[in-house]
Image (cartoon, rainbow, N blue to C red):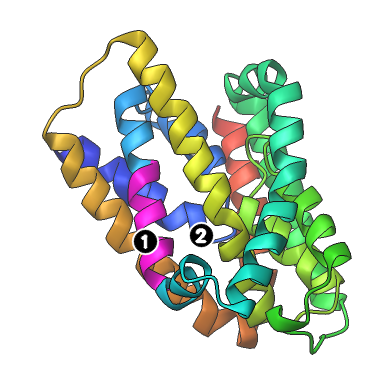
Amino acid sequence: MLEAAFWGLIQGLTEFLPISSSGHLVLVPALLGQDPPDLATSAMLHLGTLLAVLVYFRREVVEVLTFTDKGKRLLLLVLIGTIPAAVFGLALESQFDWLNERPTAVAIALFLTGIVLFSTRWLHRGEKVVADASIRDTVIMGLGQAVALIPGVSRSGATISTGLLRGFTHAEAARYSFLLGIPAIAGAGLLKGMDLVDSGAGISGDILVGVAVAAVTGYAAIAFLLRLIGRTGLAPFGIYCMVAGIVALLIV
């Protein structure tokens, strides 16, 4: 139960903070000399973070489900933004799996993520909001999400950075990133769930504790980032990723 709760904490915090959940789920076990979470735990933890983002953005979800004009447009943009990651994920799945098994490569990717995040401090602060998003904005942010399939590259960090590049405010870039991440998180959980079914592994009751921890900490991470990012930008997270990447390289 404690182990499931620990992985739920890691998943919930790192899925939405721009510090790479995939990187931490590879590097933390390597640093601790432990095995990474098994398929059952990993699949269920994605369910926890999916629940967190759906609850936090419940108004937008309701608009999509009730097919309001705003909801239909948002759904179209999110689906378009999901296409690049889906294409790259299916085409390069074996390569991403290969990288996922190499902590050194993940540590380097985390360090490079930190450089990108820190460099956004020199971007001009935009004024664009999600309601102003264009197809081009969504495609470019979707390409950022596709790059984040590389273990160690933060999905939220990549999409928020590209959002800032497209002129969104910090808070709106983060909000758009989280909405864009709903199909990605659901898809990752579905794929891991299918692997779980193929492997014949079972789900223990303790994992539900991890799901609850992932959901609560994920919700808190979303709220924390949306309140903080307008004041600090991504630079503090960039410093963290660079330091974490260097430490992981030295130890691993």
Residue at 64 percent across and 33 percent down: it is: 106
Residue 201 at x, y percent in the picture: 26, 14
Q: Residues within 10 Å of mark 1 (few under 14, many from 20)?
A: many
Q: Secondary structure at mark 2?
A: helix
Residue at 43 percent across and 63 percent down: it is: 53
The residue where tag 2 is placed is: 16
Residue 27 at x, y percent in the picture: 51, 34
Name the mark nearer the viewer: 1 or 2: 1
Question: Given the image, on which type of amino acid does mark 2 rest?
Answer: Phe
Residue at 53 percent across and 55 percent down: it is: 182
Q: Is residue 98 left or right of residue 220?
A: right
Q: Is residue 38 left or right of residue 152?
A: left
The residue where tag 1 is placed is: 52
Region rendered in magenta: 46-56
Q: Is residue 163 above or below residue 203?
A: below
Residue 126 occupies which quadrant of the picture?
Answer: bottom right
Q: Is residue 47 magenta?
A: yes
In the picture, the quarter occupied by the N terminus is top left
